[in-house]
Structure formats: structure tokens, C-alpha cells
Image (cartoon, rainbow, N blue to C red):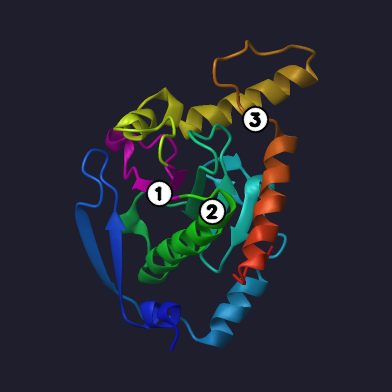
Amino acid sequence: STPEVGYIEGAVAILLDNSHRPFDELVIINHNPMSAQDQSQDMSSLAGRLINFGKFNVTSQVFHKTSHSFALVNLKPLLPGHILVCPLDVKPHLSDLTKDEVADLFLTVTRVQRTLKRVYRAEAFNVAVQDGEAAGQSVPHVHCHVIPRVTGDPGGGDKVHEWLEGEEGNVGRHQQEQQQQQQERQAGQWAKDEERKPRSKEEMEKEARWLSEEMEKDGKESVL
């Protein structure tokens, strides 16, 4: 079997990035995959589905979907290519996910990494989960940060971890600000400029379409 099939059928080894000690927690999960027929039925039912990240509608930001997970572009990426991978169902903690959801979440992370590595010429990645509010989680919906890295980028040292824990990594506030700005524009008002401005809906949709096309080039299944 292929490495990926073997990965699915065997024990799934997942390295979780701790905020200050990268890759210091190893979780082993015995995963029994769904039958091909069940998976096909689940995936076919996703077409046209409204996708929420917590309470936020992020359907237009999504560039990849599976039977249990989705990947979306970031409103305020810390570095180029910074994306999020989430379970389709809104659940706040990793421990709330089923075995199928956990396995699919991290398999989706690795699939997306392969495409990001190619298109952004990434040499490495920060892969981080803030599992709960005390760990810096700003949206009560499991999400895995996937951040491409290259030698000499602005996130050197511990800066990426500091950003994730600070206002730069507050994805919930960023989504809330975007909604508020859209409402203010409709009312003829404009929000104050920030040093790190949120991207426009059009810019994110363009990136989502591009990444979706690049994922297809890599031969990864998606139901978009």
C-alpha cells in the first residue's frame, strides 16, 4: 500500500506543537477508517455546504474539504501561506473529536503541507494547535495553524509562537473585525487603519481559488 494508506490503516502518530516546546507531545491513535461507500456518501453530501469557523461563516475562505475537515486561508496571515485546518463540526477541544475526525484533521494538515511546500518553497513549517482559551485559542473551534517557513523570514527565533499567543494570532478578533468593517462600509463608515490590516474578502477568495487549483495539481481529493 502507499505510505498514506498505511498511515490511515495503522496507528496514527501525531506530533502536536506546544507553544514553547515544539513537538513535545506524541499522541497515538488507533484509527479504523470508514468504508469507501460511507466515505463517498459523506463527501458527496458536503457540496454546497455552509462552513462555519466557530460562529463565523468562512465558506468563501475554504480551499479544501474532506469528509471531516476543511482548510481555509487566513484573514491576517502571520507569514505568507499561513492557513488553518479545522474539523467540519464545531468542537472546541481535540478531546471532543472522534478518532475519525482526529485522523482526518492531521492527514489534511499533511496534504496541505505538501502543496504549501511547493508553491511557497517552504523549507519547514510551524504546526500549532491552541487547545483551549488558556492556551491562546480565540475561537472555540479546533483549528491547526500551518505556517510555511523559510530561512531568514521575519518569524525567526520564537517570534511565531509569540505572535500566535498575542493579538497577531487572535483569529477570533480578526473575523469579528472583518464583519464589523463590512457593516460599517454598508453604512458609509470606515474602520480605523491598523498596522496589520485584514485582507479583503476578494483577496482571500482569490487565494482560496488558487490554492484549491494547486491542491488539485498535487492529486489530492477535495469536494469543492
Where 5 sits versus 104, above or below? below
Q: Which residue is mark 3?
A: 199
Where 221 sits versus 192, above or below? below
Q: CA distance from mark 3 to mark 1?
A: 22 Å
The residue that appears at 56% across and 66% down in the rendered structure is 66
The residue that appears at 68% across and 45% down in the rendered structure is 207
Q: Mark 3 or mark 1: name the one nearer the start of the chain.
A: 1
Mark closer to the observer (3, 1): 1
Q: CA distance from mark 2 to mark 1?
A: 10 Å
Q: Quadrant of residue 159?
A: top left
Q: Residues within 10 Å of mark 3 (few under 14, many from 20)?
A: some
Q: Quadrant of residue 37?
A: bottom right
Q: Nearer the viewer, residue 90 or 4?
A: 4
Q: Which residue is mark 1?
A: 125
Image coords of residue 186 (percent x, y): 79, 21
Image coords of residue 193 (percent x, y): 62, 12
Q: Residues within 10 Å of mark 2 (few under 14, many from 20)?
A: many
From where the camera sits, is residue 103 visible? yes
Q: Nearer the viewer, residue 83 or 87?
A: 83
- Check if mark 2's residue and mark 1's residue have beta carbons within 8 Å: yes
* Chain part drawn in magenta: 123-150
Q: Mark 3 or mark 2: name the one nearer the start of the chain.
A: 2
Mark closer to the observer (3, 2): 2
Image coords of residue 107 (percent x, y): 44, 66
Quick check: 117 left or right of 206?
Answer: left
Instruction: Indicate whether residue 182 is drawn in magenta.
Output: no
Q: Which residue is mark 2?
A: 116
Amino acid marked by disc 3: Arg
Give the SS element for disc 1: strand
The N terminus is located in which quarter? bottom left
